[in-house]
Image (spheres, rainbow, N blue to C red):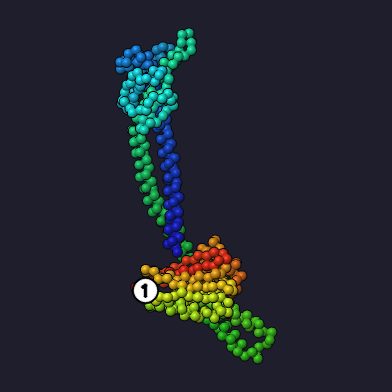
Amino acid sequence: MFQALGRRLLFSYLGVMVTIWGTSTTVVYHFLSYNLYEKLDSEIINLANAASHNLIAAKVDKQAINTQIPRVLDNDDDGDLDIPWQDLRENHQGVEWFDVNGILLAKAGNSLPQNSFIANFNVIQHKKNRSITIPIYLHGLNGGEKKLQGYVRVSESTEELQEELDRILWGFELGGLIVIILSGLGGWWLTRQSLQPIEQSFQQLKQFTADASHELRSPLTIVKTSVEVIMNYPERIHPANVNKLEAISSATNQMTQLVEDLLLLARTDALTNTQVIEWITIPLDELLEDLVEFLEPQAVSQEITLKSEISTEVFIKGEAIQLKRLFSNLLQNALHYTPKGGTVMVSLVKLERLVAINVQDTGIGIAPEHIGLVFNRFWRADQARSQREGGLGLGLAIADAIARTHGGDITVTSEIGVGSCFQVRLPLAS
C-alpha cells in the first residue's frame, strides 16, 4: 500500500515538474524566437530603405548598383541617412529592384528563391527566406505630388537563425532531462522521508489492533460462557432480565465476530511477499458447490433463487478455510442485498493461468461513486445499512484481503436497481 502511495506521489511530483519545465521552456523559446525575428526584420527593413536610393540608377544603368560609392550622410539634406546599401548587404541577403509594373530591373547579393512579385509591404516568410517589399516614391518639384517610381525587395535567409534556435531548443531539452532525472531522485528521497513516519504509525496501529483483538478474546469468551450458563437455567432468571441477557448475548456474539475479523485482517496485513506459505491443492469447484448447497436453505427462506454454473474441475493452491470464508462473504453479501424474488448466480470460468469466479445478483446495486469504497474496512453505504442491520462492514474487506493473500484480486461492477457482479480471479495450481 505504501509503495503504491509512494509511486503515486512521485509520479505526481514529476508530472508537476515536467509541466512547469515544459511551460517555461515554451515561453522562453517563443520569447527568444520573437525577439530574434524582430531583429532580423529590422535589418532587412534598414537594408531595403538604403537600397531604395539606387532605383533610379538601376533604371538608367543596370551595372550602376555594383559601383561602390562613398559613405555620405544626409547628402541631399532630406532628413534621412543615405547609408549605401552595399555596405549593409551580407552573403545571406539579396536585393531586387522592380519598376512600377513589377518587372525585375536588377538584383544583387545572393539569389534567394522567391515567389513571383507581389506588392505586399509587410514582412513575409517563404520557406527559409524572409523578405519585405517597399514602394519607392519621388517627390515632385516644389513639393508636388509624390510619384511611384518602383519597388525594392530585400530577402534574407533564416537558416542560420533557425539553426541557432534549434541549438537553443536542444539545450533546453538536455537541461530539462537532467532536471527531471535530478527531480526524480530528489522526489523519491523526499517521498521516502515523508512516508516513513506515516508507515511507522500505521504499523503501530496494526500491531495495536492485533494485540487488542487478541487480548479481547479471553474476556469476551468468559462473558459469552457466563451468559450461556445463566440462560441454561431459565428458572433462576427473573422475567424482567430475559431481554437484557439476550441483548448481552447478541452483543457478545457480535463483538466476538468483530475480534475474529480484526485478527484475520491483522494476520493478512502482517504477511509479506517474501514469506513462503505452504498452500495445499484445493478443488475449487467442489468448495463452491458445497458452499452453495450450505446456503441454499437461507436463500429459500428469503425467497431468493440461488444458482450455480460450475461445469469444470479447477484446482488452486490455498487454504480451504480462508477461501470458504471469502466466497461465503460474497454470497451472503449478495443474499442480504437481493430482494425477494431475486436471483444470485455463482459461475466459474477457467482461463489460461487464472480462474474467474463471478458472484452476480439482482440486488439493490451500488452507486458509481461508492464502487471504489466497497472494499474499505468498516465502510457501508446508507442504503446498504438500511437493508442489513448488524453488519460490521468488514465482510468485503476480508474477502479482498484473502484474495490478495492467495495472489488474486476482486473487482466489482454494479448498477443501481439492476444488481452487482463481484469477480474473483485466482491463479491456477501449477
**Horizontal relation, residue 89 to residue 27: left or right:** left
Asked if 407 appears above or below 176 in the picture, the reply is below
Give 421 or 50, whichever is nearer the viewer: 421
Give 364 or 374, whichever is nearer the viewer: 364
User: Which image quadrant is residue 305 in?
Assistant: bottom right
**Horizontal relation, residue 418 to residue 269: left or right:** right
Asked if 64 appears above or below 164 in the picture, the reply is above
Identify the amino acid type marked 1. Ala
* Residue 394 spot, x, y in % from top left: 52, 71
Give 47 or 337, whichever is nearer the viewer: 337
Mark 1 burial class by Cα count in 10 Å: few <14, some 14-19, many 20+: some
**Horizontal relation, residue 238 to residue 85: left or right:** right
Q: Can I make out residue 204 in this image?
A: no
Q: Can I make out residue 153 in this image?
A: yes
Q: Name the residue under label 1.
A: 429
**Horizontal relation, residue 224 to residue 37: left or right:** right
Helix, strand or loop under label 1: loop
* Residue 281 spot, x, y in % from top left: 38, 77
* Residue 89 spot, x, y in % from top left: 33, 23
Say which quadrant the C terminus sits in.
bottom left
Q: Which residue occupies the extreme top position in the image? A: 142
Q: How many circles with numbers are drawn on the protein?
A: 1
Residue name at image x 59 percent, y 88 percent: 229
* Residue 347 spot, x, y in % from top left: 46, 72
Say which quadrant the N terminus sits in.
bottom left
Residue name at image x 39 percent, y 12 percent: 75
Residue name at image x 41 percent, y 35 percent: 33
Residue name at image x 35 percent, y 22 percent: 95
User: Which image quadrant is residue 268 in?
Assistant: bottom left
